[in-house]
Image (cartoon, coloured by chain):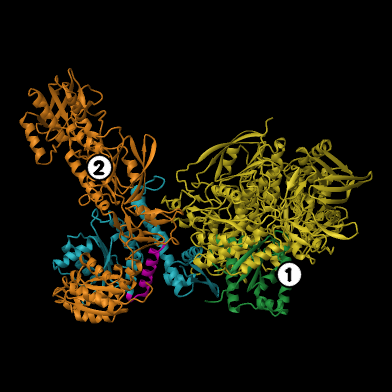
Chain colours: A cyan, B orange, C green, D yellow
Amino acid sequence: MTDFEPKIIGFLCNWCSYAGADLAGVSRIQYPTNLRIIRVMCSGRVDPALPLGFLAEGADGVMITGCHIGDCHYIDGNLHAKRKYGLLERLVAKAGLEPGRIMLDWVSASEGQRFADIVTGFTDQVRELGPNPAVTDPCVKLNLMAAKAAAAEYRLRALVGKEEKLVTEGNVYGEEMTQEEFDRIMEEVVETEFTRNKIRLILSVKPMSVKGLSAETGIDSRIILDHVVALRQRGWVDLHEVQGNSPVYRAMEVQ
Amino acid sequence: MSEEPRIGVFVCHCGINIGGYVDVPDVVEYATGLPDVVYAEPNLYMCSSDGLQKIQEAIKKYELNRVVVASCTPRTHEPLFQSACEEAGLNKYVFEMANIRDQCSWVHMHEPEKATQKAKSLVRMAVAKARLLVPEEEPEIDIRPTGLVIGGGVSGLTSALSLADQGFKVHLVEKEDRLGGTLLKLDTLFSSNVKASEVINPLIKRVKASTDVTVHLDSRVADVKGFIGSFDVGIETRGEPEMLSVGTIIVATGADYLSPEGLYGYGQVDNVVTQMELEQLFKEGGRLDGVKTLVMIQCAGSRNEERPYCSRVCCTEAIKNAIKLVKENPKRDVYILYRDLQTYGIEFSMMEYDAKKSGVKLVMYDKERLPEVTGGKRGPMVRVYSPLLDEELTIETDMVVLSAPIIPNEDNEALSKHLKVPLNSDRFFMEAHVKLRPLDFATDGIYVCGTAHSPKEVAESVSQARGAASRAGIPMAKGRLKTAAITSVVDEAKCSGCGTCIELCVYNAITKNERGLAQVTSAVCKGCGVCGASCPERAITMRHFTNEELEAQGLAALKEA
Amino acid sequence: MSYEPKIVGFLCNWCSYAGADLAGVSRFQYPPNLRVIRVMCSGRVHPAHILEAFRNGADGVLVAGCHPPNDCHYISGNLKAKRRVAMLKKLMIQMGMDERRLRLEWVSAAEGEKFARVVTEFTNQLKEMGPASMKAMAVAEDD
Amino acid sequence: MKAVGAVLVLGGGIAGIQASLDLADAGFKVYLMDKEPTIGGVMTQLDKTFPTNDCAMCILAPKLVGAGRHPNVELLTYTEIVELKGEEGDFTATLKRKARRIDPEKCTGCGDCARKCPVEAIDEYNMGMAKRSSAYIKYPQAVPLIATIDKSKCIGCGICAEVCKAEAVVYDEEDVTFELNIGSVILAPGFEAFDPSTLTEYGYGRYPNVVTSMEFERILSATGPYRGTVLRPSDGDLPKKVAFLQCIGSRDERVGNSYCSGVCCMYAMKEAVIAQEHNPGLEATIFFMDLRAFGKEFDDYYIRAEKEHGVRFIRSRVASTRQVPGSRDILLSYVEDGEVKEESFDIVVLSVGLNPPHDSAELSDAVGIELNRHGFAKTSLFKPLETSRPGVYVCGAFQGPKDIPDSVAQASGAAAKASKGIAQERGKLITKVEYPAEKDVAGVEPRVGVFVCHCGINIGGVVDVPDVVEYARTLPGVAYAEQNLYTCSQDTQDKIKENILEYDLNRVVVASCTPRTHEPLFRATLREAGLNEYLFEMANIRDQCSWVHMHQHEAATEKAKGLVRMAVAKARLLKPLEKPVIKTTPVALVIGGGLSGMTSALEIADQGYEVHLVEKAGELGGNLRHIKYVPTGENPEEELWKLVERVSGHPNIEVHLGTQLADAHGYIGNFESTLVSERGETVVNHGVAIIATGGVEYKPTEYLYGSEGVMTQFELEAKLHKGYKPDTVVMIQCVGSRCEERTYCSRVCCTGAVTNALRIKETNPDADIYVLYKDMRTYGFKEDYYREAADRGVIFIRYTDEDKPIVEEQGGLRVTVTDPVLREKVAIPADAVVLAAAILPSEDNAKLAGMFKVPLSKDGFFLEAHMKLRPLDFATDGVFLAGLAHGPKTLDECISQASGAAARALTILSQPTIEVDGAIAKVDEDRCSGCRMCEHVCEFNAIEMVEDEEGKVRSHVIPEVCKGCGVCVATCPSGAITAGHFTDTEILSQIITALQEVEA
């Protein structure tokens, strides 16, 4: 494992972190070569579906850095980055991937050393974890793809979009919602949407029965059936044919 | 751009900065083999005029429609290469950079092989994104050369005059029936002890005389529409509506003073007054002749749970008045009961020194054991515990003067809603950045100055007012504003109008159209992309940083060279 | 461009039209080839209507009514439709037409999915069969 | 006494809806209240209904829409009653409207809020087997079609308010308490299904494959979670074997429900049959104690289920279930023929009984009525619709478990009762809408106005609406076209009116949603603008276009253009139509002077209308004269006497004794009947007729009937009344019923036998009584008498058709029967053998049916218009039926039906004129060949053949009677009939335009 060189993708905000990385360069501060930077205008622009997609495609680690809280060029874009990262963390956990493969931190334009330290630390950490199992284990890859699909879906996005407002300002009834309450709701919805997207992905490869899906996912067939009902309601899954005693479902193309 | 991408890749040696660690020819060679790359070449300095010319020649010769430069950081060099592309007839947004210096050669100086591998990878990523780039337009908007100043106090008057001096028309909206604001109520100003009227009256006179400033007294802002360059502001003057068309807005609405009802006997014990009322007594003259003993109490209503902020001016003001009282009648006993004497700045500290010298008694009190004021035989009686002496003093006084804090205007809430700019937790207006953009709001074309922003003294207000006026003058002087092309765009077919983006956009760049769907005002959008990353329907695309582009970049990074 | 058949559908107001509405409410997707003509009862559909549709270039005609025996709002209109369609199918065969271009279905107000399925199946079937020749025949007759 | 001409109906299920419609049609203001956000009740959740297997939603939806749209009915949904003050005729009800948080005035029911709500909750409509959002519409056909925010599930994210383009969301709405002044109250809160989770032995809630019958109903439904395919909840496989366990929560003292729920046997059979239909090859088994198929044509259904569909019936009460680990099949152990057997099933359906609503105690407190010991409303045998509080009436399952037709009949009956006390206030609280004079459009070029709706984003998000509008402008005849955010909103209605005037429009096309719900709204708008309402046409570009082609924007836009083109083409040809007005003769003819006939006559006469009551016998009373005992303890003779007294003395009733009907003709509102008696012929003009001719007791030929000691139950009653005290009595059930000749069940005999048995025990506690039966059908609360009889020593022995009892006379009567428990023959010497003789239809039925052109069932009883929802009507308007003429039934059921038939009749009698739909058939008499084919196909007798001066017979459509189905039009070989609003030219124009290409 010593010669394992992890592939790491980094989303850097243009104004602080990217400038910090430049400063590291100007200062000739050395750090490992594993990082590949994608410049974005703001860390808040990092749609959780993007890192999940890269993890599914074999990235060993994904880091996101933005301006320090309060320093955001776009005022509070990094706060949104944090909210979205919360979803990313949940989905990574749901997919069964080590939490150490993702990271969110703040680097200012003057923190060249800090940037290098973060990259070095994260590279070591990921190296320690070894290669992304998604490359060799189709199950993990499927999970990550399901996580990506879930992150691209309306329900999770709507909730994350409302998180800041709900937990800081309260809801439309003027009732307060604690972070814990929100997290509880979120956890449930993440579980549901992750499983549903996973089912949908499996079915898009090969039509399957409820029992088949249960065997494939290790989830009780009864719960699978509930999800299939919901997926049919959404028009994502439809009956394909009946094989023996088992109706077999297929995924519908969704634009 | 429907044509097939034809990409040119230009790899910079940057002297030895890159070339010394990265095998540039190898990278060029590698780039040639990437999809849609029709041309690649190295150069010693890509950014030299020679290098730029080479790019332009290649664009023509090889009919390039995308350009990738692998060199240093786009933060400094992108504009240069972009204009080179533009000169060669390409849209500047079909240009992409690979930062193989700051983020590669310089940081991997001891691992040339890996650095070369990484450089290839960075080029591959840049090419992957370049293949998807599309030309973007930078829309231009007109800026009306007219400013609106809200508030006719010292800040408002100053900024109005400053704008007029720059040659712009100004509308000045004041809610009272006369100009002047808080200064009308003050007698003298620290530290020069000039009469407040000597400061404010000339300003009022000049404003009145100016043909460029239109004053609207008894007026309030009722409605604000539009964005930088073309705000339509509805005002109401004694119930009569009027529409003002302006290009920029300065908020100079000032502040108010707390009336400290119930604090230290105010309103209950005779001869307990505020510093503002003391100023009035000064102005009226002779009213203080019988006052032998006078106690001033600082922080009367500020720096507490309700108002945690420091009102900034009170300490200096109290000292100014104390010195004045003692100088008027050296036999007077004047006490200042304080928590922390915050006479910041050299000049003000000197005043503190002066005060001590002239016999003003400075007594610190304990926040946990506040002074008490009760009615005494001849005047208010003050009991104060001094933690330094560890004993309680009882002072029989003729008058108690409370340093009541500056508080935000009541109408700040309404105005902030109209302008869609934020207030801080103390309900003062909040600037875009506390350090770097103290006079701007996040919303372009709207600025803040004076005590509307926070408690401050006259000189500070004046300099802020001038600063705000010059900030406002910049776009108006240009007359036109090229807005960035890197903005968000909504796909109406996908949008459900859930409003998430509208809530998240700090620039108020997104509104609902007549069908209830989101629409981006490009002129206002700053291109951060938060809306797009949050849109539940994924209906928002961020120009130049589309999901497809970022995805292509990342996937290219993961591909083995 | 692939061949898109044109289908005219006669739907009874009470069951089939309601079923088509339910397909809409439930967002069941089906191909856009069908043009619906609402009639109060499937028994209102005259054989001439169906023939006119074919003569004007329809590739398929769908008649949908309430389930027999008891769902018909007008007691037995659907049974009449059934007889007429059967008769017309015979006639079509005699005319050298493919009788599968005329389809009778019972769709209840609760069968949104069935409606969508019927339209999809019928459209696909007609696609496979290719354009109807009736229009050409009609032109020839007119000559 | 002050009276208020308004009625509050509590409960918007089928019973409440029927009662409301009857009252509203009779000119009363009705407040229809339901605690749910929509009316419809349990019936909306059913897949099919027995015994006709009708689709429940198909037959219910028109009633829902009718109630929602009726100008005299005000829906108070999501509302509960708090208190009822005042007295009969003048009540004040305090109601609480729960915060729905959606403005009903603004909500268009488009469902965007539900689709964009990020919260998922249990879908109660689908019995928890699917999910819904917290902003939701309970089911797609809901009335009113308005969303509701379920606050208990809502997280308050605010998205629904944002996506609602109609701005209908009001988060800060609160519960509102308000008062209503009404004259009477009808309670129709329905029932709640028994919750079997308390019966742990059945594993419900633990074993996924044990479901309740309500859940199974949703499983069967095409709109249910599994889209109508029966799946095993545990793994989604198709079940092979499904078992139904009867009497779960019924006939079970342990759970406190001693009564029989009356409907479970039938619904279980229906579910079994439908399950087999949906999943061919499925084997259904029903475990039961007594198969209680006592209703009209129910036994035929039973026979078909067993013989045709192969449903297996096992007479055994299953004690418990076990789940097979792994497969999660359900193992049942049961005793059959004395043997313990074990069998595993894929799904076990628990046929749960009917409980009173869980809040019936609160309801009874609020309304101030007494409940019976089972928690249902307390009523009595002769006053089945009246609660303990005067002015408060009850109908439907809250009066006692019952099926839909019985509920509907009761609902009509309750309507009659509720309107009696306030009859003089009829019409006073009704606001009549006045419309401006209609513009004459004859000969004027069509000027069509086209209004294309965005429906928020429902249409506009898929279809390019501005493009469709542009296209519409190019169509021939279109004088104006515009787009609207919501065409159905009030401000758009005003705009349409303005545009009609401004652009001088004479035809209007709205391209939006479905005419089934929205056409009446736009038609009213046309009338308000002075246009005939038939000059309107709709293009359904939402339900049948944008919603079903969501991902094909271009194709959907093209289709929308096509639909608009078709609508415009039809609109250009539209003609103004006149709505026929029926003038009604406010006189009723009631045929039959028994309990039913007299009850109907009194209900009508009490409300001030003239009644002719015709009885062929020389005295009133009918079969009631034979009834001496009732299980509930009332004195039937006294009741009869009171009734006859009232009828004879009523100023509005003319009794024709010894009289028969010789002839009848005419149509609704205008009948002319000839009565004959010994005194001669009389001609009566009447607006309605009620057939209540009753039935007769079968005269047995079997079991030595005619011999000494062998008698019918009626004869036994007569003898008991005279002091007869037998020591040993053998009663034999199903004599002449449930046999090959007469397959139906006579319904009353089991209870009759039990009543008489108890009567004998009362006078002679030591008497030995044997009841030999096939199934004891003491349904409903009558189960209690059965139990009492058993407790008091009456011996019940079941026999089968294959092994009937044998009655012999060998120096006394002796009955031999096989004891199913001992499985050997036992011989019982008897003093009396009492035969439960069948109820037969009256022999005059055929003649009467011919006169009124109404049908008879195969058993010879009158056949109603619809078995489920129109039990008292005939397809022929203006003719109604009640009592035994309809089929065997008990006294209280006869009374309910009779009152109900009266209420149905009153909807006609109370209106001097009735306006009916103008879209009807019309005969061109010149082209008519007089072939009579139209007369033959018309199910409504709307076609009469008229002889002209030349003696030629021509067809003529009676406009008042025609329903506008158009079947005759399509049948006429001469092309002589046109269907108004659906003419051949109109349909042809649609066909041609449908097939046109869109010009580029």
In magenta, the rendered stretch is A135-153
The residue labelled by disc 2 is B160
Tell me if mark 1 has few (under 14), some (14-19) or many (20+) residues whose alpha carbon lies within 10 angstroms of its own: some
Is residue D213 among what the camera can see? Answer: yes
Q: Determine crowd level at label 2: few under 14, some 14-19, many 20+ residues with C-alpha closer than 10 A.
A: many
Which image quadrant for residue B364? Answer: top left
Counting from the top left corner in percent of width and height, residue D292 is at: 69, 57
Nearer the viewer's eye, disc 2 or disc 1?
A: 2
State whether residue D942 is above or below residue B206. Answer: below
Apparent side of residue D296 relative to residue B148 in the rendered image (left or right): right
Secondary element type, mark 2: helix
**D301 vs B125: above or below:** above
Residue C66 colored in magenta in the image: no
Secondary element under disc 1, as helix, strand or loop, is: helix
Is residue D411 found left or right of A232 in the rendered image?
right
Q: Amino acid at mark 1?
A: Arg
Q: Position of residue C82 (x, y in %)?
A: 71, 68
Q: Are marks 2 and 1 in contact (CB under 8 Å)?
A: no
Q: State whether discs 2 and 1 lie on one chain.
A: no
